[in-house]
Image: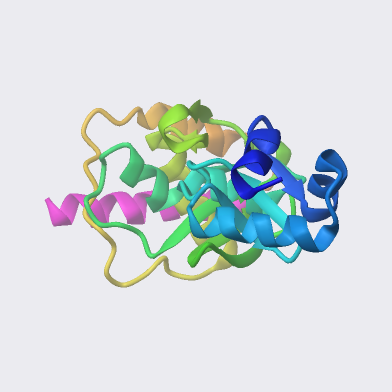
Amino acid sequence: MNAIQLYGKLSTLRQVTTRTAAQLTGQPMSTTSMALSRLAAEGLVTRIKPGSWLIGPTARKAAALVAAAAHPYVAYLSGWSALRHHGRIQQIPEIHFGVTLGRPSEIKLAGISIRLHHIRPELFTGYVYAPAMDGLVASPEKAFFDLAYFSAMNRRSLGSALPEADLRGFRWKLLHEWVRQIPSAGVRTSVERSIRKLRRQQDASE
């Protein structure tokens, strides 16, 4: 079985291990591993970590990579990465911003840096599936909220040179609804302060 035939066998899957691929095709592990490496070189699969692969030509898209980095937990693309997807900023983020119920971490997949942020279950919302990104993506409002939330939670600035964002038509009421779901009064105050700070910085850039 050549690499293309292997891809045909795996094309309906989202993610697979070398061992599972070998079992599905009846090929030796070494043969399967070499075939997967050839498919990766052609951009048809992406190596996530040793022995684990993301299947499909859209695998290098940000939301798909965020989902793979967070597996087996669900994750969505947020922050500046989501704002870029929505056309709210022009600058391309150097690090993709993911939000997950799993552990926070930083990882590099296919040469792309991903930073996963852990969030409380009640705040894991405000996203939809975006076919163009092959994954879950936060709405512009939730992306902005997440920036303010993690800035407050981490007690650090998001950067001295923030990209200019187009906030026209923003539904600010949604951000305040999410703030109200934060159980800690102290954290709510910090997030509200962070939202105001980010909003002032954006107003000043216009």
Residue 180 falls in which quadrant of the image? top right
In percent of width and height, residue 152 lies at: 53, 59
* Residue 189 inside the magenta-drawn segment: yes
> Which residue is at the front of the view, 23 or 153?
23
Which quarter of the picture shows residue 46? bottom right
* Above/below status of 158 relative to 204: below
The residue depicted at 49 percent of the width and 67 percent of the height is: 111
Q: Is residue 29 left or right of residue 143?
A: right
Q: Quadrant of residue 34?
A: bottom right
Residue 10 visible in the picture: yes
Task: Pick whichever, 101 or 92, lies toward us.
Answer: 92
Q: Which residues are magenta?
A: 186-206
Find residue 137 and report its horizontal and vertical position in percent: 49, 36
Q: Residue furthest left?
A: 206
Q: Is residue 86 above or below residue 104?
A: above
- Specify the principal SS of the magenta part: helix
Q: Is residue 192 visible?
A: no
Q: Tell me, what colour scheme is on the image?
A: rainbow
Please say if 87 is above or below 109.
above
